[in-house]
Amino acid sequence: MTALLRYQTDLLLRSQRWLAPLLLYAVFLGVGVNAGEPVLGALGYAAAALLPVTAWVVRICLGQEPAAARNVVAAAAGRQRAHLAAVLAALACAAPLGAVAVLGVTAVGDLRGVDPAGAGLAGLLATTTCVLTGAAVGALTTRPLVRSRGWSLAALVLGSLLALVTTGSPAKHAVTALVTGSRTATVPMPWPALAGGLLLAAVAVAVSVRATAWRE
């Protein structure tokens, strides 16, 4: 699995397809986060913005190999293992981006009445929840479940939006907790949302991996 992860990550970095979602996230942060605003609300916004970006990176990793190369890797390592490695490579790229964003937002946000360490931890929990939820959206809206590029993109956008606004979504719960905490000057720890995001991602990725056995 380590070799597969290295291979998928190297493909992503060499292709420079990561640049578009990175720039999109930078635009989100540049427009939506201002120095001196309440830190918890800013962290909630930064976490929410990372959800569609993560879904996009997962979609890139799952579709970046030419069909011939994908068949060779599948023959050598197994189609399902190769598919899982692509999702994990996307997570390995999105998670550090979220961690950097949390550190930056915490550094420039208004920390009055809020413990910096607690705010940073809450931001990391919410960001991880959104990364996991984004991975679930990305895994369910691209190959092998959705093969058409146009429908895949439409499903990704719609799925990301629903994940952020639907009641019961782990991402919405985590982001809402931070926004509410910003208003009350209390630091929430969205552990239940993180557990829900982990479960959702595990189920979605498992469905996507299993589907490679009968859809490809």
Image (cartoon, rainbow, N blue to C red):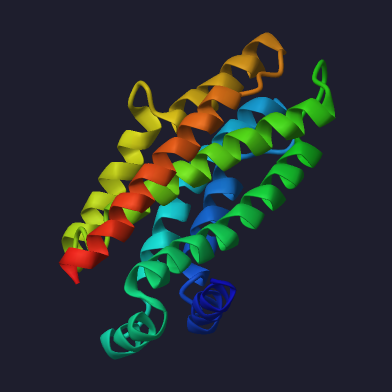
Residue 12: horizontal and vertical position, in percent?
50, 76
In the image as oriented, which residue stretches furthest toward the top? 184
Q: Quadrant of residue 111?
A: top right
Question: Which residue is found at the position 35% from the left and 21% from the top?
Answer: 167
Examine the rendered structure and indicate whether residue 117 appears above or below residue 32: above
Which residue corresponds to the image point at 53% horizontal and 54% vertical from the top-left?
25
Where is residue 18 shown, x and y percent of the image?
50, 70
Q: Quadrant of the C terminus?
A: bottom left
Q: Position of residue 34 (x, y in %)?
A: 67, 38
- Judged left or right of residue 45, residue 81 is left
Q: Residue at x 22, y 53 (%)?
A: 154
User: Which image quadrant is residue 118 in?
Assistant: top right
Q: Nearer the viewer, residue 147 or 29?
A: 147
Q: From what the image shows, is residue 195 above or below residue 47?
A: above
Task: Name the residue nearer the viewer: 170 or 3.
Answer: 3
x then y, percent, for residue 126: 59, 34
User: Residue at point 42% right, 61% down?
Assistant: 58
Q: Is residue 131 visible?
A: yes
Q: Say left or right for 111 vs 137.
A: right
